[in-house]
Amino acid sequence: MICPVPEEQRPVNEYVALKESFFFRWATLDRFAYVKTLVAIWLAWWIVTGPVAAVSFSPGRHLGQFLGLSSMGATVGLALPLLRLLLGWVYIKDRLQSSTVLYEETGWYDGQRWPKPETDLIKERLLVTYEVQPILNKIRNTVIALASLLVLQLALWQFLD
């Protein structure tokens, strides 16, 4: 059976494209490089949140509040690209696990559905199990750690005067 799905809309090719893209490949990096990238993003958010916090709390007079607000802002800022990373990988996981492929021949108005052959489905589900799911686990663990950090920051905020 000949696959009518255009090359760029086939789930395996979408996976390869996602894995090789500049933004989404961050999740495929080894632990040290991944954490280094996240720390760099968090510090970059300090460039935005630092001046905003300084307007509210002068670093000379309210150093604790300034550091706390800047940290919370940078943490929330880091959550945004992490959420996008998670959504992109979940989308690919869903496309690979689905027994049918939704595709468009020429535009949004002519969507079609093609059932995957059993061999393709098995290969793609193995790909999800051994490649995509560990990436999703890493991102989810990061989101949980980030949420925990934010809760800790909010708890510490209560003690700052």
Image: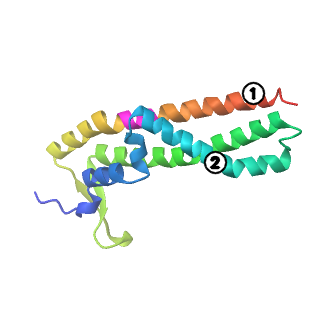
Q: What stretch is highlighted in magenta?
A: 134-139
Determine the CA span between mark 2 and mark 1. Answer: 21 Å
Tell me the SS state at disc 1. helix
**Please, is residue 24 above or below residue 154 in the view?**
below
Badge 2 crowding class, 10 Å Cα cut-off, few under 14, some 14 to 19, many 20 or more, is: some
Picture quarter with the C terminus: top right
Which of the 4 quarters of the picture holds residue 4? bottom left
- Residue furthest to the front in view is 60
Which of the 4 quarters of the picture holds residue 135? top left
- Disc 1 target residue: 155
Residue 21 x, y percent position in the rendering: 37, 54
Residue 149 x, y percent position in the rendering: 64, 30
Picture quarter with the N terminus: bottom left
Q: Left of 127 or right of it: where is 74?
A: right
Nearer the N terminus, badge 2 or badge 1?
2
Amino acid type indicated by mark 2: Trp
Q: Secondary structure of the magenta portion, mostly?
A: helix
Residue 150 x, y percent position in the rendering: 66, 33
Q: Left of 131 or right of it: where is 123?
A: left
- Disc 2 target residue: 45
Residue 3 x, y percent position in the rendering: 16, 59
Which of the 4 quarters of the picture holds residue 158? top right
